[in-house]
Image: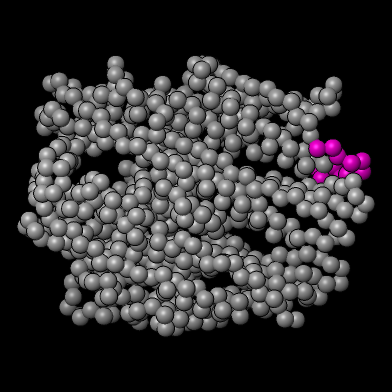
Amino acid sequence: MPQRLRGWPMRALALLGGAALIAVPASAAELSIWAVPGLYGFENTACKPREGRATAMIAKPLCPVLEGKGQVIAAQQFVASMKRNFPKVVEKFAAQLPNDATPRAKLSSGLIASLRLTRATIWTVNKGTSVDGFLPVTLTLDITNPATGEVVFTRTRSETGEGTFLAATAETEIAASLPAKLSTMIESLVASAARDWHPERQVATVIGRAGDAWVVDRGRANGLRTHDSIGADGRVTFAGPNFAIVQPTLGEYKVGQTLERTSAAPAAVLARPSVLTAIVQVPEGYSPTYLAQTFEDALGAKASLSPMPVNPGFADLRRYAVGEAQMSSSDDRPLPDYVAAVSIVHLPSGRIASNIPGVSIERHAAAVFVSLIDRTGRVVHSVQGMGRIQDEVSRDMRFSAEQRRETVIRNALLDAAAKLATFKPKNLELSVAVDGKSISIVDPQGALPLGQEVTVLRSAGRVGSVDRVYFPVGRLRTSEIMPGGVSARPDDVEPAALRKGDLVNVEYTGSGLAWRRTVGRCLEALIPRLDDRGSNPVPVASSAADAFFSANYAAPVRRWDVPPALSDLKADFANWSRFVPAGTFTADRCYVPVIAVTPDAKTRGYSLLAGYTLFEGATKITGSGLQANLTPTLIPPGTPADQAKAILDQDVALALLPLMERAAKSLNSAR
């Protein structure tokens, strides 16, 4: 039976920040692309299940179509389409260079394009002898820097095929339509991506020296970041707003010399702080890769942050490219500025009769909680997103349950991303003072937690056309609380090397720390504690508590669930061992969320309690709680118990979540 194809628009985000710099001596026109003849995404799916998180959402009936010949045909079409649409697509990595080209020249001369299947699932609505069938498919094209593993350009296309089938053969017929769907999507995806592929040659001029390094006249506003590569062998050791400090690996520069790179992203995108998405709670049946991609697409379109996508199947490709270049890569991907820890909770859907005969009400809901974590591991901001749908169903004409689940989860992710887009930290300059061997940092605002690594900057005055130039002289780590600030111990700089006027520059969110030591969730046998004093469990309570408490309590609060969610990324970034959010920690104090949802016989409603208890060891330090009353949806007689509970769970979530947030804020005054 013929299918009616319903396409979703090409997702708007393509040029993602934090990862879109390619330091090459070649011009943009000379940059080659190796299109990998493969279809990726099958590393851990229903087709090839293994321990760990799923890499893609693939319905098991589709596996026979995708395995073997299906993958080969899709891969061949991808390569052919890349050759037709993109410039300088080569058969072999670095094939355009002469055989005697240096390994570094080979690695820096080209990029790798790969095709990834993020989702291929089946939705059905039973109509008796027939079935309405849906085939949602998502494909992603990634272009990656083989020297660093950075995804420099990404495009995603989602489409849903639909049709009516005989109930007995529906899954088989839907699966048989997948190859044709993939074929049309590959052509559309590659053609649209090619229209947006505009790498640019960028030039920075050496304007003077600062310490033992060099100053160029392009900085963060122009897309240069600390640890970026530029020129043949230059490394950015610090990027200011309108200048950068560059250290060549070999030789020296001259004033007036130009350093070049090719960028696949606009400077405005690269100027934003980078954020890495970590999905810490996944609804059953979903892959973290698909959910992260949905969130990043929404966030990157309008936020003050630039998503830093990760190609989950790129490790093998990078090893191949590095092997072809006959060298081990010395360029690693810089660490992100922030981590977005995303928890997604899908609430069970509920159905009740309406006051119109033959019409029922179906409710669907999902909640998303996002904690933004800086490089110290501290949560600096949190947002909550909600997705809700209420359908009136007549004569059993309804949407697929899977489609409604997908829609509310997606809407909740979009809502959270829109709220996170308003986050805008400020730069704060703090003075460094030295008294003999004692080092202190003046910090009356309470911006620095204990244990934070900071870079000491020294003024070079005016250099060339730039009025204020600073260059790094070493690192310190905050150690003890002192009046008006914190003491610090040397990390790689001696106290004698520090001078009056040295400073540290930190990003400040405007909320100072009343307690500078680490606070975390109380755990018992690695399970987060929840003090539920009621008779009705609340599915969203634990995730909500982590987001609300960590963002509102005036202390460096760390998330217990973030290091495990980041554990698979160790090989993708440079200096991962120094990336504090990915490391385990011991909290000096811990908190336990307190909730209660209990029936109120007098009002025929429910009494709600939300609060937190703070502990130091086994000793209770303080606590706070708030109460409210809930008048739930009236449940018609004869409603099945599971449907009634689902409706109540949604009512409770809507009433309890704002109460939990206010309780977290009130805990500061209870200290």
**Residue 68 % position (x, y):** 55, 78
Residue 9 in view (yes/no): yes
Above or below: residue 523 compared with residue 23: above
Image quadrant in which you'd find residue 486 = top left
**Residue 669 % position (x, y):** 51, 17
- Residue drawn 50% across and 38% down? 382
Instruction: Check the picture and name the quadrant holding the N terminus.
Output: bottom right
Residue 327 in view (yes/no): no
Q: Magenta stretch: dominant SS?
A: loop
Structure colour scheme: one colour
- Residue drawn 15% across and 37% down? 458
- Residue drawn 58% across and 33% down? 545
Image quadrant in which you'd find residue 332 = bottom left
Above or below: residue 209 compared with residue 36: above
**Residue 513 % position (x, y):** 40, 25
Of residue 513 and residue 35, the one placed in the foreground of this image is 513
Q: Is residue 538 left or right of residue 77?
A: right
The tally of labels here is 0
Q: Is residue 299 left or right of residue 21?
A: right
Which span of residues is magenta-colored?
A: 633-643
**Residue 636 % position (x, y):** 89, 41
Above or below: residue 382 compared with residue 487: below
Image quadrant in which you'd find residue 6 = bottom right
- Residue drawn 9% across and 58% down? 256
Of residue 40 and residue 29, the one placed in the foreground of this image is 29
Q: Is residue 544 left or right of residue 488?
A: right
Of residue 511 and residue 117, the one placed in the foreground of this image is 511
Magenta stretch: residue 377 in it? no
Of residue 647 and residue 435, the one placed in the foreground of this image is 647
